[in-house]
Image (cartoon, rainbow, N blue to C red):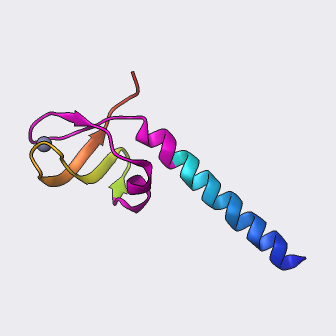
Amino acid sequence: MDYLLIALILIMAIVVVVLIAKSISLHKFKCKHCSNEFNIKWPKIIITEHSGSEYKLVCPFCKIKDWCTEQPKT
Ligand SMILES: [Zn+2]
């Protein structure tokens, strides 16, 4: 019974993380080098190093890996 509860909590934690990542993936990220905005896939958000609204991403336009700013949803 205890194991079932732990498994349930773990599954719920994973679901929450995925939902947060999916909601962030609806936002665009702005590259500081070329000012282009781009979207990234949600699994990438989970594994990406970030600090507040800054995400360390490789820009698909200029291929530079640097901190990109999460843009507010329009
Ligand atoms: Zn760029």
Q: Residue at x 77, y 65 (%)?
A: 8
Residue 68 among those drawn in magenta: no
Q: Residue furthest right?
A: 1
Residue 40 among those drawn in magenta: yes
User: Which stretch appears magenta?
Assistant: 21-49
Check the picture and name the quadrant holding the C terminus. Answer: top left
The image quadrant that residue 36 belongs to is: top left
Q: Does 73 sit above or below residue 7?
A: above
Spot occupied by residue 65 in the image (x, y as percentages of width and height): 16, 56
Quick one: 52 or 46, which is closer to the camera? 46
Spot occupied by residue 11 in the image (x, y as percentages of width and height): 69, 63
In the visual, does 23 lie left or right of 16? left
In the visual, does 69 lie left or right of 24? left
Q: Residue at x 43, y 35 (%)?
A: 26
Spot occupied by residue 61 in the image (x, y as percentages of width and height): 13, 42
Check the picture and name the quadrant holding the N terminus. Answer: bottom right
In the visual, does 69 lie left or right of 14? left
The quadrant of the picture showing ligand 1 is: top left
Could you tell me how many numbered marks the image carries?
0
Q: Residue at x 9, y 42 (%)?
A: 33
Quick one: 53 or 56, which is closer to the camera? 56
Q: Residue at x 14, y 34 (%)?
A: 35
In the visual, does 32 lie left or right of 40? left
Quick one: 63 or 69, which is closer to the camera? 63
